[in-house]
Image: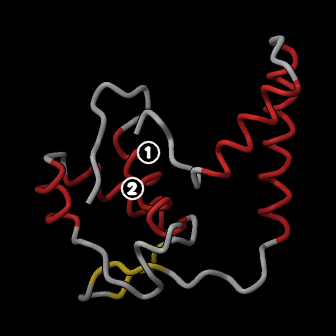
Amino acid sequence: MFQIDLKSHKAIYEQIVDNFKLMIARGVLREDERIPSVRDLAKELTVNPNTIQKAYRELERQGYFYTVLGQGNFVAKRPNTADRQKVAGIYERLRESVRDLLFYGESEEGIIGSVREEILKGGQNDSD
């Protein structure tokens, strides 16, 4: 399914969350598709099942997954219209990040190039 980088600065559950988000964004996982059970994914990735469960709970909290009791976890339907408040919050975090980068001396061209590169590769993190 995907690999976990044990040397990454990111927590394992965050890497799992990021990988699932990327797979959904790229259409590898589709709406209402069943995802592996906690036990199966833990075995495949050789990580603690509690770590997988934490990632699944976070993905459900963020609206990427939903659970059907007794049947497992599934990819949630993408909203037809964006949650404007959530989008506004994401843009605010982006603006804060840009201000921080400028404060640390990064160039406008470098920041724009980095954002463009991130868009082109679909949000995939190089360290994952």
Q: Which of the pair 23/50 is nearer the observer?
A: 23
Q: Is residue 20 left or right of residue 25?
A: left
Estimate the x, y position of residue 75 in percent, counting from the top left.
44, 79
**CA gap, disc 1 and disc 2:** 7 Å
Tell me the SS state at disc 1.
Answer: helix
Estimate the x, y position of residue 110 in percent, counting from the top left.
78, 26
- Kind of residue sitting beneath label 1: Glu
Mark 2 burial class by Cα count in 10 Å: few <14, some 14-19, many 20+: many
Q: Which residue is drawn at 64% across and 51% down?
A: 120
Q: Residue 14 carries which label?
A: 1
Name the residue that disc number 2 marks: 55
Question: Considering only vertical position in the picture, is 99 above or below 90?
Answer: above
* Display colour scheme: secondary structure
In which quadrant of the rendered image does the N terminus lie? bottom left
- Kind of residue sitting beneath label 2: Ala
Q: Residue 119 carries which label?
A: none
Check if mark 1's residue and mark 2's residue have beta carbons within 8 Å.
Answer: yes
Q: Is residue 104 left or right of residue 26?
A: right
Q: Residue at x 14, y 65 (%)?
A: 40
Q: Is residue 34 left or right of residue 23?
A: left
Q: Residue at x 27, y 46 (%)?
A: 3
Estimate the x, y position of residue 56 in percent, counting from the top left.
38, 63
Tell me the SS state at disc 2.
Answer: helix
Mark 1 burial class by Cα count in 10 Å: few <14, some 14-19, many 20+: some
| Displayed quadrant of residue 80 | bottom right
